[in-house]
Image (spheres, rainbow, N blue to C red):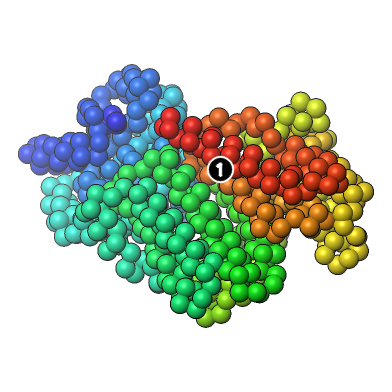
Amino acid sequence: MTLALLSAGGGNALDPPDASGLEQDLVTALRAAGASEVVRLGDPGSLRALSRRAHDANQRVLICADNLVAHASLLRTLATEPGGRSTALVVADPAGDLRDDRGKLLPAQPGAGTVRYLGALCVAPADLPTLEQVADRPDLLSALLDAGVVPVATPVRLLRATQVRTSSELAEARAEVAAVDEEAARLRLAVKERDDFFTTYAVSTWSPMVTRAAARLGLSPTAVTWLSVLLAGLAALAFWQASRPAMVAGGILLYLGFVLDCVDGQLARYTRTFGAFGGWLDTMADRAKEYAVYAGLAAGAERIGLPYAWPLAITAILVQTVRHMTDSWYGALHDEAASHPRPRPAGGVGARLATASTRVQGEAGSAAYWLKRIVVFPIGERWALIAVLAMLADGRVALGAVAGCGLLAFAYTLALRSLRSLSMRVGVLDKVDTGRHRDDGPLVRHLLAGSFEAPLLCAAVGVVASLGLVAALLFGWAEPPAPVAMGVVALLILAAALPARARHDGPLDWLVPAALRAAEYLYVVAVGRAGSVAASVIFLLLFTLALRHYDLTARMEKCTPAGRGAGPLVGWEVRVVVLAVLAPAGHPTLAEAGLAVVVGGSFLWRAVADWRRT
C-alpha cells in the first residue's frame, strides 16, 4: 500500500475550476497507482508526521506536485518499483540539473545534466527517516539527494508528463496525454529500453504480442518462467537424443524457451506484478536452464560416440559461472561508484575507458554500440549460438563454441573492468556480509579466519595453484592420483581464509568471490581428473555449486532477504577439505557425488523453506 501526498507545484496561475479539476484527476490517478490514502500536504510538521506514520506501517510515500499532468501508468510505475527503492519521475533534458547514471538519479554539475525532475517522487520505507529530517525544505528531491538518498530514475519515455502553470498549458498537456495510446505504450515500455543484439531483433520485435496474450490469459510472470523452464528442459532432452531431427527440434525449443524467458520480465513490467520470489526464480531459472542444456549437449555427443564433449561442458559451466560472479559484483561496484563517487585520476587508463564506454553507450544502434554489446557474449547470443550450431552440427561443436567464446568474453571484460575499477577507487564487498558472499563455512569463521590484508592475493594464489594442478594432470606432468600435489594445492586454496576478517575494501576486492569460486571449481576438476571420476559426476557437482552461488548473488541483486542460508554448515573450505581427504584415500567419486547431494539438497531445502515463507 502507498500513502500519497499532493504538494504545491509553485507559481500556478490556473483558474479555480481548472485547478480543482486537475486535483481531482490527480487523486484518481494516485488511487489507480495503489494509494490507500491521498492527502494534501500542509506544513512541514504534517509531512514529518505522515512520514513517521508511513514508516511505522512499512508503506511507501508517493509525493506528487499538484500541477502535474501525466498518464496514470507513470504514477503506478513509481509506486511499484520492484526493488523497493525510492524513485523519481524524470524526462530527458540536456539542460537539466540531474543525471541518470545506470538508472540512478544523481546531482549534476552545470552543463552536465541529462534529465529533469517532473514533480513526482516515491519514497521507500527505508528512506522515510531521511525524508522526515528534510521535511522543512521545499525542494524535497534535492534535499534527499543532498542527504545521500539515491533514487531510481523513472523516465517518461513513450508516455507523457508535464507540470503546468496556466490554463492554456493545462489544456495543451491534456491534449498531449490523450493523443497517446496508453495501453499500447505500456506494452511497448514492458520491453527493456536497451537489450542485446539478438534479443532486440529476434525476440523483442514480436514478444510483446506474447506478453499481451499471457496477460489476457491471466498468466503470472512466475507461470511463464516455469513454461520457459519446461521448454528448455525439453530442448536438453532433444539434444541428448542427438539425432538430426531431435537436434533441430531442440534448437527450436531452445529459442522458444528464450522468448518466454524474455516474456516473463515483460509481463511483470506490463502488469506491474513484482515479487521477491519471481525475481529470484527468474535469475536462478536462467542459469539452471542453460546448464541443463550443456548437460544435454554433452550427453548427446557422448551417445553418438563423440569424445571430449563432457570436458567442454565442464569448461563452459566453470567459465560462465565465474564470469557471472564478476558481472554481479562489478555491477554492485559500479552502482557504489555512481552513488558515492570519489575523485578519479585525470587521464588515467581507467578514466579514458570509462569515457569511451559512455560515448559508445550513447550511440545506440551504431556498429560500435552493438559490437560492445555482442563481445561480452550475453545470454541471447549464447542461446542463439547453441541453437544454430546444434541444428547444423552437433553438441560437441556447440559446446566448444560456447566455451571458446565464453573464455574470450571473460578475458575482455575482466581486463577492462579491472582497469576501470582501479580508477573508481571504491570498495563494495565491505558493504555487505562479506563472509556470506565469500561462502565461508565454520572452519573459516571459527578457526582459520585472520586479518591478513590481502584477500584478493590469497584467493588468486588458490586459483593459480588449482589451474596449475589441472594443467599438470591434463598434460601428464603429474601422474594420477598425485596425492602430494593435491594436498599442497588444497593448503594453498585454504590460505584464502587468512584474510577473511580483513576489510575487503580494495578497488579490486570485488573479484574475491569469483576468485574463490574459480579456485574451488578448478580443484573439483583436478580431483575428478586425478581420481578418474566420471565427467558427468564432476559436472553435476559444479552444477549444484553454481546454483548455491547464484542463489547468493540473486538475493543480492533482487534485494531479497538473505534467508536461512546465511550461516552455511558446508562452506568452500569444508568442501575443499573433504575432497583433499577422501580423494587420496581412494574415494574421489564418493567425495564428489556426496558433495553434489549435500550441496544440491541444502540449496533446495533452503530455497523451498525461504520462499514458502514469502
Could you classify mark 1 by the number of other residues whose Cα lies within 10 Å: few (under 14), some (14-19), or many (20 or more)?
Answer: many
Residue 461 x/y as whole percent: 83, 49
Q: Quadrant of the N terminus?
A: top left
**Amino acid beneath label 1:** Asp
The x and y percentages for residue 120 are 31, 41
Helix, strand or loop status at disc 1:
helix
Q: Is residue 244 left or right of residue 55?
A: right
Can residue 577 be seen here? The reply is yes
Residue at the image point whose x is 42% and y is 67% from the top? 253
Which of the 4 image quarters holds residue 192?
Answer: bottom left
Q: Nearer the viewer, residue 195 or 219?
A: 219
Along the viewing direction, whichever of 166 and 491 lies nearer the viewer = 491
Give whichever of 367, 590 is nearer the camera. Answer: 590
Percent x, y for residue 566? Answer: 60, 31
- Quarter placement of the C terminus: top left
> What residue do we see at 50% from left, 78% from top?
244
Up-down relation of residue 107 to residue 418 (above or below): above
Instruction: Name the residue rendered at 27%, 63% in the picture.
Output: 209
Name the residue rendered at 27%, 55% in the picture. 214
x and y, in percent, of residue 229 in the image: 44, 55
Q: Is residue 512 left or right of residue 287?
A: right
Residue behind mark 1: 551
